[in-house]
Image: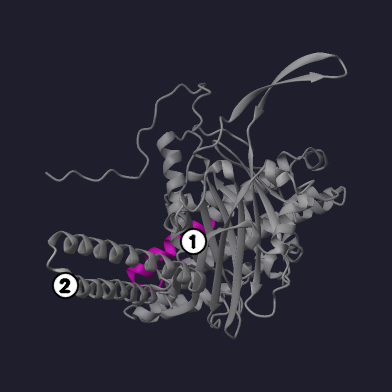
Amino acid sequence: MVQPLPSTRPGKGRSEPADNPAASWRPRAQLRALFPSPSSLRGGRQEPAPVSDWASLFGDLARSAATAVEPGEAVEWRVHDKTHLEFAIDFPLAASEQTRVWEAYFFVPESFRIHEATYSKKAIYDDLQSYVRYAVGELPFAELARNTEGSWLRRVSKALEQAGADPSSPSANAEATRELRLWACLVRASGLAAMRAVEQLLCDELDPTRVKNEALGFAVLCNTVGREFRDVVDAARAHKLADEVLFTLAWCDEATSLAIEAVCADLALRLEHDARVEAAHPDLAENVAAAAVAEARARAERGYDSVTRAGANERDIEHLEFRRHVLKRFTASVLWLSHEVREGAMWVVHVLYAIAAALAMAFAVFAALQTNQLSDNVFRYALLVVLAYAVKDRLKAVLQEVFNKWISRRFPDRLWTIRDHERKRDVGQVRERAGFVPFHKVPDAVLARRRLTREHALEECARPERVLWHTKEVRLAPGVDPSFPMLTEIFRLNIGHWLAHTDDPKRRVLFADPDDASIYAAVARRVYNVSVVYRLRPCEGADDAPWHRIRVVVGRKGILRIEPIC
């Protein structure tokens, strides 16, 4: 009898007392929303402030398009989890073909026991995973609230109208689903950027009035974006749409609402926890929180499966996170690209190995012909045959090793083809190499960056290191879709194997205080520094591109922090 699959929907969760502090999954109230009355404080006096007045602040939230940056600056480093270092590289797309070169040198402590004998190229590439996607364009969040000619909402509406006019058209349906998913990605990216712009005001010299105006304007803008998109969704549902378009329509509506709720809730909590803002405008955080609550109510009215309440059990919270993740992955799928990886010198290897085998066999045949003249002495004949076979076997192995070294210096380890399957085109070609480099072959500019934090050259004897090198040459096809200004490649480096031979995470340290003449004991955390020197440059004419450096501080239990050096 076939057993039914378990449902991901909420069920009966763990039963624990409500006052049990160990129940970390239990929802805890952080802030109660306050829906604004027809009047609010403005300019220090009670004065009517309708929502349209808040909407006039939309322009203050628009951020200008990012200016061009140096190639080496287009790299973002972060800690993904305890054992994974993550870095993202942006490759701008242009009207013509262009090539970018990524170079990185990892200075790894010798105590990690990471070297050529213990860490093969296959292991390096197994630990260094890569994901490639399009990056959405930088767009002011206010632009997503417009439903006029040339706006993104109008673009989505037209795609839905074409899908409704001919529900049996695969191309029209595919275009509508792409536009809907791309819209959800734009809302998530632009909304987050707009929220961070408001939060940045809390880090600068605080102007409570400006913070209030920007925060309220952002909250109203969020609700406007959500409401305008829901109007487009309702209008599209009046037409006869294919099942796949209806499904995408509902999921993108839900994903958009969740993204807006998240940025509003995050900003509200930041405002609530800032004592200066709370003292100047006590109800500001509650008014911003109302925008998040409005989105949750809208999803509840539509019967979406991502609404959770205060009495939620463990399964409810688990399902909410699962639902959020699924929606994010579904909408982001419009950006992801695939890559086909193959050996960089496969045919060269086969040809040279065949030459090695032929030379070894030629020696064996020659030796066999010579030993035929000694056939009268069986023992001497057998000895020479065995010796000839042994020399032939070793000759083949030595030649293969020599050819391998020659190939590794002149050919890439791997060749990539980056493909956009949704739009059926190749986006780029990649040549990749990695391996260990002796210190005397590391470029002087790289060593200069590495030695910036060292007091003396002899310090290298106290902290010996191995140098792991990684490079990629990325040849990008001409960009044909203005919706995607660049590619983003996300590397995820697993350093779990690096930490297998590290010392205990904590040690007891004794020291004497010269001032009070006492002996003290303390627990010291044992840490290691992995320096990374890197740059991203054009393929030609940019050998003087600057090198950058970060320091990754790790312990036996994983990555502790990342420190920018230069």
Figure check: 300 above or below 51: above
Bounds of the magenta segment = 234-257
59 is within the stretch colored magenta: no
Give the tally of numbered discs: 2
Q: Quadrant of residue 66?
A: bottom right
**CA gap, disc 2 to disc 1?**
58 Å
Horizontal side, residue 23 vs residue 217: left or right? left
Quadrant hosting residue 150? bottom right
Residue 356, can we see it? yes
| Image location of residue 254, percent across then percent down | 47, 57
Name the mark on residue 476: none
Q: Amino acid at mark 2?
A: Asn
User: In this figure, which residue is indicated by the disc labeled 2?
Assistant: 372
Does any portion of residue 48 appear in the rendered image?
no
For the point 87% across and 52% down, which residue is it?
Answer: 43
Quadrant in the picture for the C terminus? bottom right
Residue type at tag 1: Ser
